[in-house]
Image (spheres, rainbow, N blue to C red):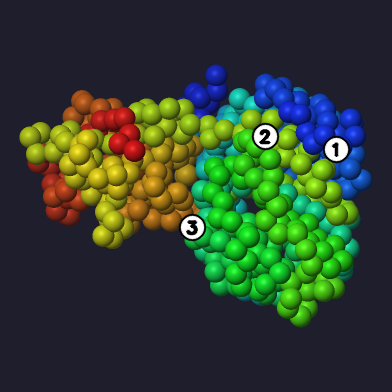
Amino acid sequence: MIKAPWTRSIRRALLAVGATAGLAAGLLTATATTTQAATQAPCDIYAAGGTPCVAAHSTTRALYATYNGPLYQVRRASDNTTLNIGLLSAGGYANAAAQDSFCANTSCVITVIYDQSGKGNNLTQAPAGGAAGGPDNLANAFEAPVTVGGHEAYGVYVAPGTGYRDNNTSGIATGDQPEGMYAIFDGTHFNGGCCFDYGNAETSSTDTGNGHMEAIYFGNSKSWGYGGGNGPWVMADLENGLFSGVNRTLNSGDPTVNNRFLTAMVKGGPNQWAIRGGNAQAGSLSTYYSGVRPNVSGYNPMHKEGAIILGIGGDNSKGAQGTFYEGVMTSGYPSDATENAVQANITAAGYNSGSTGTGSLTPGSRISIQATTSPCCTTDYLRHDDADTKVVISSINSASSATDKADATWIVRAGLANSSCLSFESANDPGQYLRHYNYELYLDTDNGGSTFAQDATFCPTTGNSGTGHSFQSVNYPTKYIRHYNYTAYIAGNGGSNAWDATASWAQDTSWLTASPWS
């Protein structure tokens, strides 16, 4: 008999500063508490500094102290119904519980990220562009869980192929007009693909030449410019170039940064621009570059067009990955003092990874998955193999290498294809998940597609042997995660494949959730 999967939303079960002295007092009212909404939010601070927001996007909190509208919209797979996700209170935090309830027993994607500025610059599914077809994928609504001020929230998890855009905006800088922008990213989720951007881009979704973009880029691409160390870096995508400073290639003053929550800023005006950044959980901003435009033709003056992109390049290049939590764009070139006050507000907001601890099957928990088959395998754990992408079991103990321990550690996520089930993200390879392909298990990068989501989703049941848990494939419900000859598969209790053998099937498909090795 097939055991029924959990039918409740695991996510629902988890619910339970001063600023820069040089600013006027009106800029210094960002609250230091993380248990209530700020008395001033980032866009209030920008407005007080004379550079008001003309776009304000967040899936986690209000960016104005008085904002009380929707943050974003989700669409569930079961019936294609949509729901706007709002705030717990005006100026406060996202009502994530509404998403948890609406998306229970199915999956949801983020369809709209609303503009809080009143300009109507909402981000929606990006269309085809000069570099790639479309429309782009939409972000899984559960893939970036966090807490902000102690409240559950979700970020925008951009897998390769995912993108948002608005080509018909209001108030965004064009030509050589001055502007500023910031975004909060996950500094551990990146790649070298083009291009994980947030900011100003072409209105045609095509490359129209040097200087037609001005967007924040985050990643470790070295195809154009790069900074010190091995990356990732905060840079500016100015079209046909990622710039870390005045030079087209290396600018060593732009450092490698990988804070779990990263504040990234770019601002630009007539023959001046800057890159700034810092830890979004604590501390002040650093200036990575401030000076004249790049010493390459086409960037002075600039030719900005005023579209807004998230997760993609200006021509819809969509090979990048990253995670976005909030960001704004301003009219005018913000002062360093204004940006410093915004950073104080950000650190006071209380971003946290949202981890629920270790050793349990609740999303956010770090676990290791231990085999129960006796006598062969009770010291073996499910792990990915560094020699290839296959998932296997092998013995792990206190004397094992740090790499082996990390390979046998997983982060529990709400199921990509069913939020009431589970997915398992590699602890040492962010963005890569346990998934089956031709019935064998692999570690693979989430591509944002529905097939991947189903292949990477498993519903926990009572262990088939009566011990621990078994993990049922959501798209092959007669098959469970099994080890066979030390290799991992999804397997039925009897069938045409060798790994479907009935001998020891119940034990081989039963697992203990153990404390993480890493």
Picture coordinates of residue 143, whole percent (x, y): 52, 43
Q: Is residue 341 visible?
A: yes
Instruction: Please tell me which of labels 2 and 3 falls first in the chain.
Output: 2
In the displayed structure, 143 sits above or below 9; it is below
Instruction: Please tell me which of labels 1 and 3 falls first in the chain.
Output: 1
Residue 22, numbered label: 1
The residue that appears at 64% across and 27% down in the rendered structure is 149
Q: Quadrant of the N terminus?
A: top left
Q: Mark 1 and mark 2: span between their CA atoms?
A: 19 Å
Picture coordinates of residue 212, whole percent (x, y): 77, 71
Q: Secondary structure at mark 3?
A: loop
Question: Which residue was labeled with disc 3?
Answer: 447
Q: What amino acid is labelled 3 in the image?
A: Asn
In the displayed structure, 518 sits above or below 176; it is above
Instruction: Please tell me which of labels 1 and 2 falls first in the chain.
Output: 1
The answer to which of 230 and 373 lies nearer the viewer is 230
The residue that appears at 74% across and 76% down in the rendered structure is 295
Picture coordinates of residue 30, whole percent (x, y): 78, 29
Question: Which residue was labeled with disc 2?
Answer: 347
Whether tag 2 and tag 3 are in contact, CB under 8 A, the answer is no
Whether tag 1 and tag 3 are in contact, CB under 8 A, the answer is no
